[in-house]
Image (tube, grey):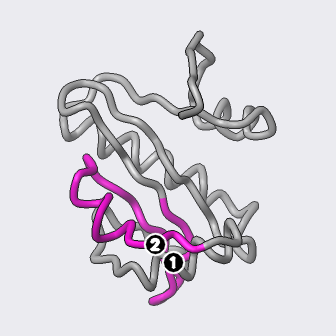
Amino acid sequence: MIEYAIDPQLSDERLDRLWQAAWGSPIGDYARDVLPRSLGYVGAYEGERLVGFVNLAWDGSVHAFVLDTCVDPEFRRQGIGRRLIAEAARTARERGATWLHVDFEPHLDGFYRGCGFRPTAAGLIRL
């Protein structure tokens, strides 16, 4: 059974284990440096094990942004990612956001459309 938690106590080590499994690289001091500035974040757990995560960045007003959605490869295709996004959207709404944005690569289009996102025109500069 997967449990979902809003703003769970996360250590860099616990988040790094998930990040390594999902992306194959270390996440660094994310829990210490990034999460305190977030509107919120959601963790998915199987028992004590963190198996999914999504961060909600924001502009301090009405715009929230989905960042760093990840699910451990052993737990993919079970609806965990969609539930993480649903919980993030609910949390953003409850905390005063009016708009929820996401950027993603083309192969994730079906996933994010399935979560209710609709395409918009946007721009991007690699810095």
Q: Position of residue 70 (x, y in %)?
A: 59, 60
**Left or right position of 94 against 114:** left
* Region rendered in magenta: 26-53
| Residue furthest to the bottom | 48
Residue 7 position (above or below residue 21) = above
Q: Which residue is mark 1?
A: 16
* Magenta run includes residue 27: yes
Q: Position of residue 55 (x, y in %)?
A: 41, 53
Give the image quarter of residue 35.
bottom left
Give the image quarter of residue 5.
bottom left
* Magenta run includes residue 85: no
**Left or right position of 74 against 69:** right
Q: Position of residue 99 (x, y in %)?
A: 36, 23
Disc number placed over residue 28 in the picture, else none: 2
User: Observer-nearest residue: 49 or 127?
Assistant: 127
> Residue at left 70%, top 40%?
111
Q: Are marks 1 and 2 in contact (CB under 8 Å)?
A: yes
Precedes in sequence: disc 1 or disc 2: 1
Disc number placed over residue 74 in the picture, else none: none
Give the image quarter of residue 107.
top right
Residue 63 position (above or below residue 24) = above
Q: CA distance from mark 1 to mark 2?
A: 7 Å
| Residue type at numbered disc 1 | Asp
> Residue at left 60%, top 55%?
81
| Residue type at numbered disc 2 | Gly
**Left or right position of 7 against 76:** left
Circle 2 sits in a helix, a strand or a loop, which is it?
A: loop
